[in-house]
């Protein structure tokens, strides 16, 4: 589905369905340098279970036009603008990595619009190493390589996904490679600069679910305790054997967990 948001053409995957105002809505938000396709399985699943699904391409990502939003706050404002354009009064949000921070900011800023959040592969703050930032700034393929390698648990470096037809490492690399120059750096820099996450978490009024990979090397679960303590109402699900790229590494277990709030 294409819709105009602030005069830009924005793309959202809806499982080829029109938005039904009588159904609850789930918005899926991708991570840095990615697009809506990382949420395809979950989007289809929740569409079949009677929800409106809106898997977004953030501005300048995937099939969406418009200028990149340079901060988590600006991306959160865009999500609300999108809901307005789609005439959706209230939604649940599921975000991965960068998308989790956007979901957190949305829930804190607009409690009347957000009924629940699922934060996947998350932490706050979410600092990014200088090596990744420098490579991304220079549009160096090394940034893609580092994020792909560190984004998977060690056992998933060799494939072996339980769901057929998923080439994990190659698929992630291709997503980074097809992003426009500057997109990955914009997103990584936005994560690195977002230092108010814990304060914003204290303002969240809706139920929150954190889904974490035990073997996550980009947002290690051991560092998420401050965020867990800041959220007033949170449930934490730990996925054994999963790294950071949870939607690919543990897709079925993820779907089961998402039902807790979505």
Image (cartoon, rainbow, N blue to C red):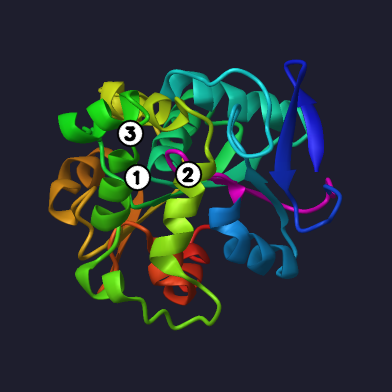
For mark 2, does the 10 Å Cα neighbourhood hold few (<14), some (14 to 19), or many (20 or more) residues? some
Identify the disc placed on residue 140: 3
Any part of residue 132 in sight = yes
Identify the disc placed on residue 177: 2
Q: Residue at x 21, y 43 (%)?
A: 229
Q: Look at the image and give the residue range highlighted in magenta.
A: 20-36
Location of the N terminus by quadrant is top right
Q: Secondary structure at mark 1?
A: helix
Residue that sits furthest to the left in the current view: 222
Q: Secondary structure at mark 2?
A: helix
Any part of residue 129 in sight = no
Q: Which residue is mark 1?
A: 144
Disc nearer the start of the sequence (2/3): 3
Q: Residue at x 68, y 26 (%)?
A: 65
Residue 91: quadrant of the picture: top right
- Of 191 and 135, which appears nearest the observer? 135
Instruction: Give the side of residue 94 with respect to residue 249, left or right.
Output: right
Residue 55, image x and y in percent?
A: 64, 48
The CA span between labels 2 and 1 is: 7 Å
Residues at circles 2 and 1 in contact by the CB criterion of under 8 Å: yes
The stretch drawn in magenta includes residue 83: no
């Amino acid at each position: 589905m294409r819709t105009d948001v602030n005069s830009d053409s924005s793309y959202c995957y809806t499982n080829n369905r029109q938005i039904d105002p009588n159904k609850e809505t789930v918005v899926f938000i991708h991570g840095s340098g990615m697009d809506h396709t990382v949420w395809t399985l979950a989007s289809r699943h929740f569409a079949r279970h009677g929800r409106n699904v809106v898997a977004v391409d953030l501005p300048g990502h995937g099939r969406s036009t418009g200028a990149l939003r340079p901060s988590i706050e600006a991306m959160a404002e865009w999500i609300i603008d999108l809901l307005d354009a789609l005439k959706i009064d209230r939604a649940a949000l599921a975000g991965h990595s960068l998308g989790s921070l956007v979901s957190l900011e949305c829930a804190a800023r607009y409690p009347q619009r957000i009924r629940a959040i699922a934060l996947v592969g998350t932490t706050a703050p979410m600092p990014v190493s200088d090596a990744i930032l420098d490579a991304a700034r220079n549009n160096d393929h090394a940034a893609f390589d580092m994020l792909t390698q560190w984004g998977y648990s060690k056992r998933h470096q060799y494939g072996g996904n339980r769901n057929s037809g998923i080439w994990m490492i190659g698929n992630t690399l291709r997503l980074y490679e097809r992003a426009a120059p500057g997109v990955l750096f914009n997103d990584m820099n936005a994560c690195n600069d977002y230092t108010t996450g814990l304060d914003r978490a204290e303002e969240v009024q809706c139920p929150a679910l954190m889904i974490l990979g035990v073997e996550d090397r980009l947002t290690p679960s051991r560092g998420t305790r401050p965020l867990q303590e800041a959220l007033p109402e949170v449930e934490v699900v730990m996925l054994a054997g999963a790294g950071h790229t949870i939607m690919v590494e543990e897709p079925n277990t993820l779907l089961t967990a998402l039902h807790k709030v979505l």
